[in-house]
Amino acid sequence: MTAPAIEIHDMTVAYHRKPVLWDIDLILPEGKLICIVGPNGAGKSTLIKAALGLVPLASGKVEFYGQPYSRQRHLVGYVPQRESVDWDFPVTVLDVVLMGTYGRLGWFRRPGETERRWARQCLEQVAMADYASRQIRQLSGGQQQRVFLARALAQDAKIYFMDEPFVGVDAATEQAVVRLLRSLRADGKTVVVVHHDLQTVRHYFDHVVLINMRLVEAGPVEEVFTAANLQNTFGGRLTILEEAAEAVRTGNRSS
Amino acid sequence: MSYLTWLVMIGTALLGGTAGVLGSFAVLRRRALVGDVVAHAALPGLCLAFLVIGARHFVGMLFGAFLAGLAGIALMTIVCRWTRTKEDAALGLVLSTFFGAGIMLSSYIQNMDGGGSRAGLETYIYGQAAGMLREDLVLIIAVSALVLAVLAAFYKEFKLLSFDPGFAQSQGWPTLTLDLTLMGSLTLVTVMGLPIVGVVLMAAMLILPGAAARFWTDRLERMLLLSAFLGAAAGAIGSLISAGVARWWLGFDPLGFAEGQTAPTGPVIVLCGTGVFVFSMLFAPNRGLAARVWRWWRLRAKTGDENLLRTLYEFTEGAAAGARPVGASELTSARAWSRWQANWRLWRAILRGWVRRVDGGVELTPVGRAEAERLVRAHRLWELFLIHGASIAPDHVDRDADTMEHVLAPEILAELELRFGAAAAGEVPRSPH
């Protein structure tokens, strides 16, 4: 058993006094590809944001390798949802990736030639090196996603949080993201991904967290990703249940 | 030029430049109207400071205005966050409430014994650059230097905050403090501008230079430098026109004011800024309106030219080259073009040597035929792809292929050729429908 990378104890999060997440207790192992699955409004993104301190906790605590986040920021990389920024902002692709190095640079220091070279390497890992000097408005959705991934790589973290990296991307980007996830795992990194496509869970991830405002189940995909657990997570919604059944069926066939 | 004119020009240029840079951040963060709130919210602060001090003390009154401006921003933030009021509503609410309170206080001061003339409050509402003193200029220089130094020191942090505040916070940057620093600087510059351009017009000083600069560049650094320059230019030129210097240079007043009369400085500066903005909006390369209309028109013309060639080619396909001239009426019925459009496109094609007039109509020249073959090939390969690759019904294909063929890149064409085996002789595949 590897050391837990992330431990969440008794986490409750509320927006406008309405609880979004209840009493989440979660231990996530190091070196795994972990996905968070649940219906819309289940609090998947909120879980990530609360872990990163972007939304306040009503109660509970989050620890990274046994320490609070404020001491471990340098170990954590973050890929926000693509729609969270204005893609008409006047910066280049390289500028955005360089932002990943700001945390390590600290106050007042500007990114120099070392950082630029590093940022270009990160762009190469997502096959976007040729776009370094493009203005970000000229990118397609999939390219925008890859730029955000490169920025997180530039953070040179041990734990990565990715909020819906597969939403609205082309097939080439989806494959690039999957390759990247696997190479991160090969380097011993832990990656936590908010995911919504049940069909690909078995194929892409080792570990799954099923939530619907409260934790339904968490554990290795083979044990936890079952029809019964999915029904508990998604409730009685027919279309999603069908999708879930299909996902479980295809999983059984391939294993 | 008189000493006073120099003084006012330097002061307004500095104000315009600094407001332009700070306003750029506000524009990019979609908070352009925050400056407007600050300016209006400052009025009760001016009045209260006058009442407390009991005399017209420039720095003291501006300090009062600064505090009131910050209070306005704070109130707006609180209303947004705690009451689910939307930002625009909160903005309008705070702006008008503070301004109303300010007007009320100022009429109270006007009615005091000899208070009205002493406070000079109307100069803050409408602005009066001509009344600038040496001390005022020193203050403007000091505030501009301070604000620009803060911007230079925290440039990287402000850039990150403006682009992606969530990511900035995840990296541990104190986003709230940075935000307050930026807003505080904006308030400082806004308040400093009140005696020059007034409460009502200060927002324009903040918004116009940044909005204009955005048209010219896609880089933040350049946008900030350009907005500083444009703001300073608008300030300097506006103050010179207002001081009548333009009449002295040009021999007439550009605004049509009679000899000895002058236009108020604030409005003239703002109109200069508007001129810069309108010019940028129309004529900036890439983002400007003229460039966009030109690009659209060029694509339309190119599409029309290519459709003409393809139509002429298809009329005579299979027959020996140039076997039969095509009449203009055949063209108009085949492509749903008006007579005028058909003639216009023919005229362009003849000029390029693609088409020549013969008895009974027009025909393709050898050059035109080669070009047409290239186009038809692209069109049909794309049609094949739509049918086989995207499974679109054959009778729906022509319209979609019609719009795409004009923009297909050579690499895509090469791939299509590979797929549908037309590469061998570069030949034109048969039409699939």
Image (cartoon, rainbow, N blue to C red):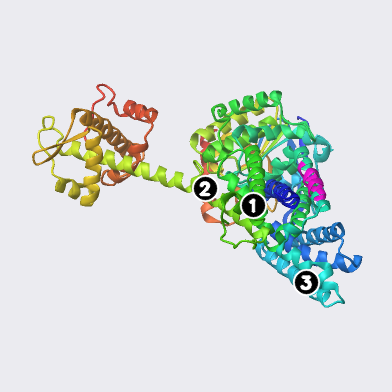
Question: In the image, what residue type sits under mark 1?
Answer: Val
Residue located at (25% from left, 30% from top): B371
Frontmost residue, B279 versus B309: B279
Q: Is residue A137 left or right of residue B314?
A: right
Q: Is residue B310 magenta?
A: no
- In the rendered image, the residue lying farthest to the right is B53
The residue carrying mark 3 is B101
What residue sits 25% from the left and 48% below the top? B341
Q: Earlier in the sequence, mark 1 or mark 3?
A: 3
Q: What residue would you read off at disc 2?
A: A243
Chain under numbered label 1? B
Dominant secondary structure of the magenta stretch?
helix
Question: Left or right: B23 with respect to B407?
Answer: right
Q: Give the foreground label among 3 and 2.
A: 3
Tag count: 3
Q: Nearer the viewer, mark 1 or mark 3?
A: 1
Chain letter, disc 3 residue: B
Q: Amino acid at mark 3?
A: Ala
The answer to whether B352 is drawn above or below residue B82 in the figure is: above
Which residue is painted at 55% across and 39% down in the image?
A: A200
As drawn, is A204 to the left or to the right of B102?
left
For the question of whether residue A9 can be seen, the reply is: no
State which region is magenta: B138-148
Q: Tell me which amino acid carries mark 2.
A: Glu
Q: Can the viewer see residue B164 in this picture?
A: yes
